[in-house]
Image: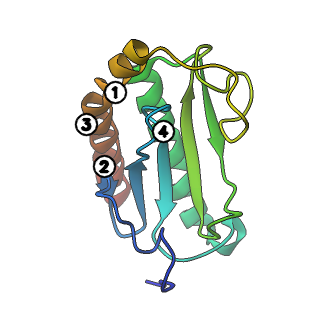
Amino acid sequence: MTRQAGCELCELAVTPVYRDEQLAVILVDDPAYPGFCRVVWNDHVKEMSDLAPAERMRLNDAVWHVELALREVMAPGKVNVASLGNVVPHLHWHVIPRFADDAHFPNPVWTAPVRTTDESILAARRALLPQLSANIARRMQKYGQSKET
């Protein structure tokens, strides 16, 4: 596995919800965005085009499974999926549940906030995180087993 010293995604400081030999799924600790996930490719590569076709399919399928879990558990109005890597040039995808009352809606989460989401709403969404983690882990483990057979 290719790692780069000092890369925060090579040296994940958080415990992943799911991890295998190719990728990891983490919940981002963002108080304003409960359920914000990242799907991180384990090897230090910068772009999707650095992956072999089967690896690209594996990564895309993982993002799809995380999106399905978010929709099932958190019921967002929309799910944003983005691969930027401008600050950390290590291949990863952001999978973000969006709600009409979130701090930035309808703008991207990286822009200036336009409102403050009520804390009771955020607390209710945070209460879903254990269920979300379990759903992601179940989906990814089932998917990983089916790919091996």
**Element carrying mark 3:** helix
The image position of residue 32, as x and y in percent, is 49, 31
Tell me which label, 2 or 4, sits earlier in the chain.
Answer: 2
Residue found at x 36% / y 47%: 143
Residue 110, relative to residue 144: is it above or below?
Answer: above
Near mark 3 (Cα within 10 A), the count class, few <14, some 14-19 or many ≥20, is: some
Quadrant in which the N terminus appears: bottom left
Residue 10, relative to residue 70: is it above or below?
Answer: below
Q: Would you say the residues marked 4 and 3 are in contact, meaning their CB atoms lie under 8 Å apart?
A: no
- What residue is disc 1 on? 126
User: Looking at the picture, which amino acid does disc 4 mark?
Assistant: Phe
Residue 33, relative to residue 57: is it above or below?
Answer: above
Q: Would you say the residues marked 2 and 1 are in contact, meaning their CB atoms lie under 8 Å apart?
A: no
Residue found at x 34% / y 27%: 126
**Element carrying mark 4:** loop
Identify the image quadrant of residue 74: top left
Quadrant in which the C terminus appears: bottom left
Tell me which label, 2 or 1, sits earlier in the chain.
Answer: 2
Near mark 4 (Cα within 10 A), the count class, few <14, some 14-19 or many ≥20, is: many
Q: Which mark is residue 134?
A: 3
Mark whose residue sits in front, 2 or 4: 4
Q: Which mark is residue 17?
A: 2
Residue found at x 30% / y 38%: 133
Question: Can residue 24 be seen here?
Answer: yes
